[in-house]
Image: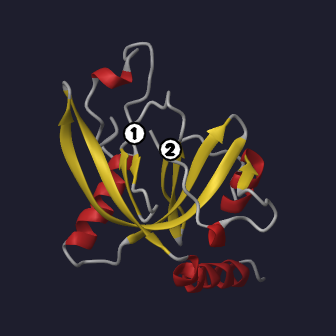
Amino acid sequence: MVTPILAASDRSSKEENGTISYRQMCANEGVKVLERGYNYRLNPAYSVLILSSSPYAFYENRISSDGRTMECEGHDVRKNMLQLDPKAFDQPWRLKCGRPSQNGLFAEAARAFADGKRDAEIVRVYEKLAWGMWRDMGFYRLVGYSYTRSGSRMVFRFRLERVQRSKVQGRLALLSLHASLASEP
Protein backbone atom coordinates (compact mmCIF):
# COMPACT_ATOMS: atom_id res chain seq x y z
CA MET A 1 0.00 0.00 0.00
CA VAL A 2 1.26 3.49 -0.82
CA THR A 3 1.10 6.16 1.85
CA PRO A 4 -0.07 9.42 0.26
CA ILE A 5 2.74 11.95 0.75
CA LEU A 6 3.18 15.26 -1.01
CA ALA A 7 5.37 18.16 -0.03
CA ALA A 8 3.60 21.51 -0.03
CA SER A 9 6.15 22.90 -2.50
CA ASP A 10 5.20 20.21 -5.04
CA ARG A 11 1.46 20.86 -5.01
CA SER A 12 -0.09 22.13 -8.20
CA SER A 13 -0.76 25.86 -8.07
CA LYS A 14 -4.07 25.18 -9.81
CA GLU A 15 -5.27 22.68 -7.22
CA GLU A 16 -4.96 23.65 -3.58
CA ASN A 17 -4.93 20.06 -2.33
CA GLY A 18 -2.57 18.79 -5.04
CA THR A 19 -5.07 16.60 -6.85
CA ILE A 20 -5.37 16.70 -10.61
CA SER A 21 -7.64 14.99 -13.10
CA TYR A 22 -6.62 12.11 -15.35
CA ARG A 23 -6.89 14.48 -18.32
CA GLN A 24 -4.51 16.98 -16.63
CA MET A 25 -2.03 14.19 -15.85
CA CYS A 26 -2.05 13.12 -19.51
CA ALA A 27 -1.69 16.76 -20.61
CA ASN A 28 1.30 17.14 -18.26
CA GLU A 29 2.96 14.28 -20.14
CA GLY A 30 1.82 15.30 -23.63
CA VAL A 31 -0.12 12.08 -24.27
CA LYS A 32 -3.78 11.20 -24.78
CA VAL A 33 -3.71 8.04 -22.65
CA LEU A 34 -1.59 6.74 -19.77
CA GLU A 35 -2.43 3.09 -19.11
CA ARG A 36 0.75 1.40 -17.90
CA GLY A 37 2.20 1.84 -14.44
CA TYR A 38 5.77 2.01 -15.79
CA ASN A 39 6.52 4.28 -18.75
CA TYR A 40 10.23 4.35 -19.56
CA ARG A 41 11.24 7.58 -21.31
CA LEU A 42 7.71 8.60 -22.11
CA ASN A 43 9.49 11.77 -23.19
CA PRO A 44 13.25 12.36 -23.60
CA ALA A 45 13.71 14.07 -20.21
CA TYR A 46 12.29 11.51 -17.78
CA SER A 47 10.23 8.39 -17.24
CA VAL A 48 6.78 8.18 -15.62
CA LEU A 49 5.56 5.87 -12.87
CA ILE A 50 1.93 5.59 -11.79
CA LEU A 51 1.17 4.21 -8.30
CA SER A 52 -2.05 3.41 -6.47
CA SER A 53 -2.70 4.28 -2.83
CA SER A 54 -5.70 2.00 -2.60
CA PRO A 55 -5.57 -0.72 0.05
CA TYR A 56 -6.73 -2.99 -2.80
CA ALA A 57 -3.81 -2.10 -5.08
CA PHE A 58 -2.37 -4.99 -7.08
CA TYR A 59 1.24 -4.07 -6.30
CA GLU A 60 3.22 -3.75 -3.09
CA ASN A 61 4.75 -0.27 -2.98
CA ARG A 62 6.39 1.41 0.01
CA ILE A 63 7.06 5.07 0.67
CA SER A 64 9.19 6.24 3.58
CA SER A 65 7.41 8.29 6.23
CA ASP A 66 9.25 11.44 5.10
CA GLY A 67 8.44 10.77 1.42
CA ARG A 68 12.08 10.91 0.34
CA THR A 69 12.43 7.31 -0.74
CA MET A 70 10.14 4.71 -2.20
CA GLU A 71 10.34 1.10 -3.26
CA CYS A 72 7.97 0.02 -6.01
CA GLU A 73 7.09 -3.42 -7.30
CA GLY A 74 7.54 -3.97 -11.05
CA HIS A 75 4.72 -4.71 -13.48
CA ASP A 76 3.19 -8.11 -14.11
CA VAL A 77 2.68 -9.98 -17.37
CA ARG A 78 -0.43 -8.90 -19.24
CA LYS A 79 -3.62 -10.72 -18.46
CA ASN A 80 -4.98 -12.65 -21.43
CA MET A 81 -6.92 -15.82 -22.25
CA LEU A 82 -3.92 -18.05 -21.51
CA GLN A 83 -2.65 -16.12 -18.48
CA LEU A 84 -5.75 -15.39 -16.43
CA ASP A 85 -3.77 -14.71 -13.25
CA PRO A 86 -0.74 -12.46 -13.88
CA LYS A 87 0.34 -13.00 -10.25
CA ALA A 88 1.06 -16.65 -11.10
CA PHE A 89 3.99 -15.69 -13.37
CA ASP A 90 7.41 -14.14 -12.85
CA GLN A 91 7.52 -10.46 -13.73
CA PRO A 92 9.11 -10.29 -17.20
CA TRP A 93 12.55 -8.98 -18.16
CA ARG A 94 11.66 -9.20 -21.84
CA LEU A 95 8.59 -9.22 -24.07
CA LYS A 96 7.82 -12.27 -26.23
CA CYS A 97 9.31 -10.44 -29.23
CA GLY A 98 12.66 -10.19 -27.39
CA ARG A 99 12.66 -6.46 -26.61
CA PRO A 100 13.09 -5.40 -22.97
CA SER A 101 9.87 -5.04 -21.00
CA GLN A 102 9.26 -1.86 -19.03
CA ASN A 103 10.75 -3.75 -16.06
CA GLY A 104 13.80 -4.55 -18.16
CA LEU A 105 14.24 -0.95 -19.29
CA PHE A 106 14.01 0.40 -15.73
CA ALA A 107 16.36 -2.35 -14.45
CA GLU A 108 18.93 -1.63 -17.20
CA ALA A 109 18.86 2.09 -16.31
CA ALA A 110 19.32 1.31 -12.59
CA ARG A 111 22.18 -1.10 -13.34
CA ALA A 112 23.96 1.40 -15.61
CA PHE A 113 23.66 4.04 -12.84
CA ALA A 114 25.05 1.60 -10.25
CA ASP A 115 27.95 0.80 -12.61
CA GLY A 116 28.71 4.53 -13.03
CA LYS A 117 27.88 4.48 -16.75
CA ARG A 118 25.10 7.10 -16.59
CA ASP A 119 23.26 9.51 -14.34
CA ALA A 120 20.28 8.17 -12.43
CA GLU A 121 17.09 8.02 -14.48
CA ILE A 122 14.67 10.78 -13.48
CA VAL A 123 11.16 9.46 -12.84
CA ARG A 124 8.02 11.55 -12.40
CA VAL A 125 5.64 9.79 -10.03
CA TYR A 126 1.87 10.10 -9.98
CA GLU A 127 -0.33 8.55 -7.31
CA LYS A 128 -3.85 7.37 -8.06
CA LEU A 129 -6.07 8.52 -5.20
CA ALA A 130 -9.46 7.45 -6.55
CA TRP A 131 -11.19 7.08 -9.90
CA GLY A 132 -10.28 10.19 -11.92
CA MET A 133 -8.22 11.72 -9.08
CA TRP A 134 -4.44 11.80 -9.21
CA ARG A 135 -1.60 13.49 -7.36
CA ASP A 136 1.69 14.60 -8.90
CA MET A 137 4.22 13.40 -6.31
CA GLY A 138 7.13 15.04 -8.08
CA PHE A 139 10.44 13.75 -9.37
CA TYR A 140 12.60 10.90 -8.10
CA ARG A 141 15.92 9.35 -9.10
CA LEU A 142 15.96 5.64 -9.93
CA VAL A 143 18.89 4.46 -7.79
CA GLY A 144 18.57 0.69 -7.69
CA TYR A 145 16.56 -2.45 -8.26
CA SER A 146 16.40 -6.07 -7.22
CA TYR A 147 14.78 -9.14 -8.73
CA THR A 148 13.62 -11.20 -5.78
CA ARG A 149 11.34 -14.06 -4.84
CA SER A 150 7.87 -13.13 -3.65
CA GLY A 151 5.92 -16.26 -2.85
CA SER A 152 6.20 -18.58 -5.84
CA ARG A 153 7.40 -16.01 -8.35
CA MET A 154 10.13 -13.45 -9.06
CA VAL A 155 9.34 -9.73 -8.89
CA PHE A 156 11.22 -6.51 -9.51
CA ARG A 157 11.66 -3.99 -6.69
CA PHE A 158 12.76 -0.51 -7.83
CA ARG A 159 14.30 1.99 -5.40
CA LEU A 160 13.77 5.71 -5.93
CA GLU A 161 14.98 8.83 -4.08
CA ARG A 162 13.21 12.18 -4.17
CA VAL A 163 14.69 15.03 -6.23
CA GLN A 164 13.64 18.63 -5.80
CA ARG A 165 11.86 20.03 -8.84
CA SER A 166 14.44 22.80 -9.08
CA LYS A 167 17.13 20.15 -9.78
CA VAL A 168 15.30 18.91 -12.89
CA GLN A 169 14.11 22.30 -14.16
CA GLY A 170 17.19 22.67 -16.40
CA ARG A 171 16.57 19.29 -17.98
CA LEU A 172 12.91 20.17 -18.59
CA ALA A 173 13.82 23.58 -20.04
CA LEU A 174 16.31 21.95 -22.41
CA LEU A 175 13.63 19.51 -23.54
CA SER A 176 11.21 22.38 -24.17
CA LEU A 177 13.84 24.28 -26.17
CA HIS A 178 14.66 21.17 -28.21
CA ALA A 179 10.96 20.60 -28.98
CA SER A 180 10.48 24.20 -30.11
CA LEU A 181 13.58 24.12 -32.33
CA ALA A 182 12.49 20.83 -33.88
CA SER A 183 9.11 22.29 -34.81
CA GLU A 184 10.57 25.28 -36.64
CA PRO A 185 10.52 25.07 -40.47
- 126 and 26: which is toward the camera: 126
Alpha-carbon span between mark 1 and mark 2? 7 Å
Mark 2 lies on a secondary structure that is loop
Is 84 on the left or on the right of 93, as rendered?
Answer: right
Residue assigned mark 2: 37
Type of the residue with mark 1: His
Residue at the spot 36% in from the left edge and 73% down from the top edge? 120
Relative to 93, say whether 139 is above or below.
below
Is 73 on the left or on the right of 34, as rendered?
Answer: left
Residue assigned mark 1: 75
**Image coords of residue 18 (percent x, y):** 71, 58
Name the quadrant of the C terminus.
Answer: bottom right
Circles 1 and 2, Cβ within 8 Å, touching? The answer is: yes
- 33 and 49: which is toward the camera: 49
How many neighbours does mark 2 have within 10 angstroms: few (below 14), some (14-19), or many (20 or more)?
some
Residue at the spot 29% in from the left edge and 21% down from the top edge? 88
Q: Is residue 110 visible?
A: yes
Type of the residue with mark 2: Gly
Is 148 on the left or on the right of 105, as rendered?
Answer: left
Name the quadrant of the N terminus.
Answer: top left
Residue at the spot 63% in from the left edge and 58% down from the top edge? 136
**Image coords of residue 155 (percent x, y):** 26, 38
Per the rendering, the mark at residue 160 is none
**Image coords of residue 74 (percent x, y):** 36, 43
Q: How many marks?
A: 2
Mark 1 lies on a secondary structure that is loop
Colour option used: secondary structure
Relative to 50, say whether 166 is above or below.
below
Is 48 on the left or on the right of 109, as rendered?
Answer: right
Q: Is residue 100 visible?
A: no
**Image coords of residue 94 (percent x, y):** 30, 43
